[in-house]
Image (cartoon, rainbow, N blue to C red):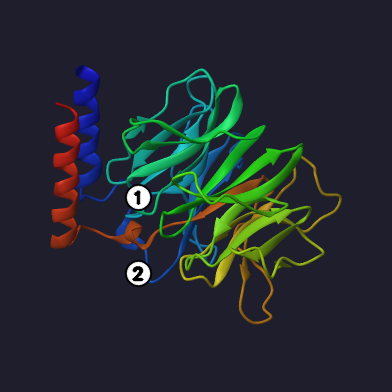
Amino acid sequence: MKMKYAFLVFGIVLVLSSNLFAMNLSAQVPGKQYISFSSLRTGKLDIYIIDTDGKDLRQLTHDPVAAHSATWSPSGRAFAYVSHRDGNAEIYVMNLNTKETHRLTSHPARDDNPVWSPDGKWIAFSSNREGNYDIYKMDVNGENLQRLIDEGKHNSAPAWSPDGKRIAFYSIRNEIGNIYVMDVNRRNLIQLTFGVGPSWSPDGKQIAYYKGSGIYVINANGQNNRRVSPLETWSERPAWSPDGHWIACMSELENPWGDPNRDSNIYVIPLKGAGKPRQITQHQAMDYSPAWVPSGFLAVSPTANTQTTLWSKLKQISHTTK
């Protein structure tokens, strides 16, 4: 009973709080785009945020061990991430208004690769809690756990389509790793291409991914596969911008590639014109796992319509805890 009320209290804080969190959001400039990323710049992994001009760097987490792999709620007011503070990889969520954190998973196995659904109701993630890595989903309170994908030797890196009806993911089947696309109801499985780390375009027509040393883009139907990162660079972990004009990634300009202590930084690759990738972070430590921050991150308070929606969600949370 106490645990259920704890979930209720967290839900209240998460959906109704409209105060700014400790960062001074009033200093942010409307219209700017922001990217979160994980970095070893303090000697341990934490999550940071920076604008696409490479300015206004802020540290979001101060994890005692390691925090990484941020995924944002559609509202931009919370993000889920992986923390190792309890001895293994578990998924937490942070409310940006209060900076409070809440643990969503609790299992001796490793829970990783969280990704928030477009409707804000679910978080998909990968876990080896049944032996092999499979893909699961849970609601934003860490309840209603469901296994979505369990075929093959390994399944990870889930990515929701913008309409929330499909999931792209990485899977090892017949000893070969490929990117697959499947309906959320487990139907219409398609083997798309050889590669890792899928990221959907905002219109749902294309998927970015990485293989070898570069970032590639392919149509969601498997056609028109092409490389978008320069040949002379090593790049991975693509993340498509909400406006569809850019792909953020981690990249390294030096050779040889593959050094675990490499000083990779965050870049954005333009998808229109002949522009070159633009470097966003500049640090000797490894910066990786970029994620675009929703515009709601800049909001000071909800609109009346949003308040009504949030109150409806609050009543749903309250009902489930009774």
* Quadrant of the rendering where the N terminus is positioned: top left
Q: Nearer the viewer, residue 176 or 33?
A: 176
Residue at image coords 44%, 60%: 162
Please give the residue where the numbered disc 2 appears in the rendered image: 30
x and y, in percent, of residue 317 in the image: 20, 36
Tag 2 secondary structure: loop
x and y, in percent, of residue 298 in the image: 33, 60
Q: Is residue 28 above or below residue 124?
A: below
x and y, in percent, of residue 283 in the image: 65, 51
x and y, in percent, of residue 154 in the image: 65, 34
Please give the residue where the numbered disc 1 appears in the rendered image: 23
Q: Amino acid at mark 1?
A: Met
Tag 1 secondary structure: loop
Label number found at residue 261: none
- Whether residue 57 is visible here, answered yes or no, is no
In the image, is 144 to the left or to the right of 302? right
Marks 2/1: CA–CA distance: 15 Å
Residue at image coords 39%, 59%: 294
Residue 221: name its quadrant: bottom right
